[in-house]
Amino acid sequence: MALGKRRPARSPGEGRRGAKPPTAEVARQEAGEGLDALEVLRLSHDGRGIARDAQGKTIFIDRALPGERVDVRRHRQRRRFDEAHPVQVARPSAARVVPACVHFEVCGGCSLQHLEISAQREHKSGVLVEHLHRARLDVPAVELLAGEAYGYRRRARLGVKLDGEGRLRFGFRRRQSERLFDIEQCPVLLPGLEVLLAPLRECLQRLEAPRQLGHIELIAGDDAIALKLRQLKPVAADESRWRVFAEAHDLVLIFDRGEPSALPTLHYRLDVAGRSLAMGFQPGDFLQVNGAVNRQLVGAALDWLALPAGARLLDLFAGVGNFGLPFAATGVRVAAIEGSAAMVERVSANARTLGLGISTRAMDLGQAPAVEDVDAVLLDPPRDGAQNVCKALASAGPERVLYVSCDPATLARDAALLVAGGYRLVRIALVDMFPQTPHLESLSLFERR
Ligand SMILES: C[S@@+](CC[C@H](N)C(=O)[O-])C[C@H]1O[C@@H](n2cnc3c(N)ncnc32)[C@H](O)[C@@H]1O
């Protein structure tokens, strides 16, 4: 199976006007020399194939899968490992599939599209377990919460730039590069967002001053789609073009001029206890990117904790109340803590609109809050994890702690603190929030022994 060639990393001066003519080395490479035939042993955590060369040096190979035999060209040499890309897959893996996206080889976004979806999930489960085992933890069988393999992302930020020749570039960043490539499709986006890419490009091409546009964000609520434009300087003629565009495509238009301004509120829905909760959020707020998997995640949190009405839950890193409000809808007494004052306001506004009682507080959870007098703690920190919170839970935490994590390394570090403090990991699920990418989310339930 021959693959498209990827250019080796550019040396200074290469590709610019006045570059030197091809050297003997370039001519040798173009004649197909300088390739290594390698057996791929396993996948790295970031989704690259790992092999060893004849000297035992580790080689990370883009777009290569375990069990494959690949002819590779090295594009970066380092002291302890090299990086390579396949020129040909001589023996493909049975788990190899044709990527759905035409940009797979260049895009920095989804590096696992060539791996069949159930194998992606098996790989991510393995990564999760490996991190926890390294922290010397006992791990129960990993459950799975997952949705569609494509068409799930409800938020995307797209770059806009004019290149050296004044040509418009509109898209995502290339792999391992700051440069943008032109996007034609993005099959991981919700279909309602993906169809906007071509008309957006047409609109961009008609702008008077595209240089004054930093980036474009698309955000889908269940009730409306917002188009947020990072406008570096106001350009009246372009702003009216965008107004016409937004009206034609039924979009909520937001000009972000880098200063505080009134923003619209969008909503996503969660079905809880026979009610459909409309969760309000604003374009700058944290939003779980995969709506269908988020519904499963919230459902699992309710099921796994199974708190009776009147029980007390501390919801840490609460966002707009994605977990806290559904628990409150089942009669649980929720105290929500979140670092962003704007999102704390949103939790309160959501609670008022939904007629739910919930106490809220803005606080930096780099420091631990008081954790007495609660029946359970739910925490959903950013990638850094919640080391100080887990230290406090380890010394005086409640019977049960439910940890939603988007980074298995910090989860393992924090889980080890909980276990050292007397908790046991009793249930864990891989939450496949970001199919086609190596990112993984997880849900872990800890109980006091
Ligand atoms: C992964 S999001 C989870 C949000 C929410 N639980 C949800 O499901 O939508 C993490 C949240 O933690 C908040 N956060 C980040 N750092 C924080 C800190 N040091 N203290 C308190 N909150 C923080 C962010 O604003 C964000 O809302």
Image: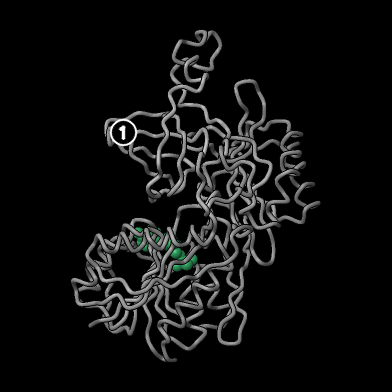
Q: Is residue 146 above or below residue 3?
A: below
Up/down of 240 relative to 389, above or below: above
Q: Is residue 144 visible?
A: yes
> Where residue 33 sits: x, y (%)?
46, 22
Q: Is residue 242 left or right of residue 135?
A: right
Tell me the quarter of the image containing the N terminus: top right
Q: Residue at x 39, y 29 (%)?
A: 76
- Front in this rendered view, residue 285 or 260: 285
Q: Quadrant of the C terminus?
A: bottom left
Q: Nearer the viewer, residue 54 or 439?
A: 54
Amino acid type, callout 1: Ala
Q: Nearer the viewer, residue 236 or 420?
A: 420
Q: In the displayed structure, would residue 403 be above or below residue 135?
A: below
Neighbours of disc 1 within 10 Å: few (<14), some (14-19), many (20+): few
Q: Could you tell whether 403 is left or right of 223 in the image?
A: left
Which of the 4 image quarters holds residue 382?
Answer: bottom left
- Disc 1 marks which residue? 54
The image shows residue 211 at horizontal and vertical percentages of 63, 31
Does residue 344 appear in this view? Answer: no
> Which residue is at a point 52% across and 19% down the rendered structure image?
31
174 or 402: nearer the viewer = 174
Secondary structure beneath label 1: loop
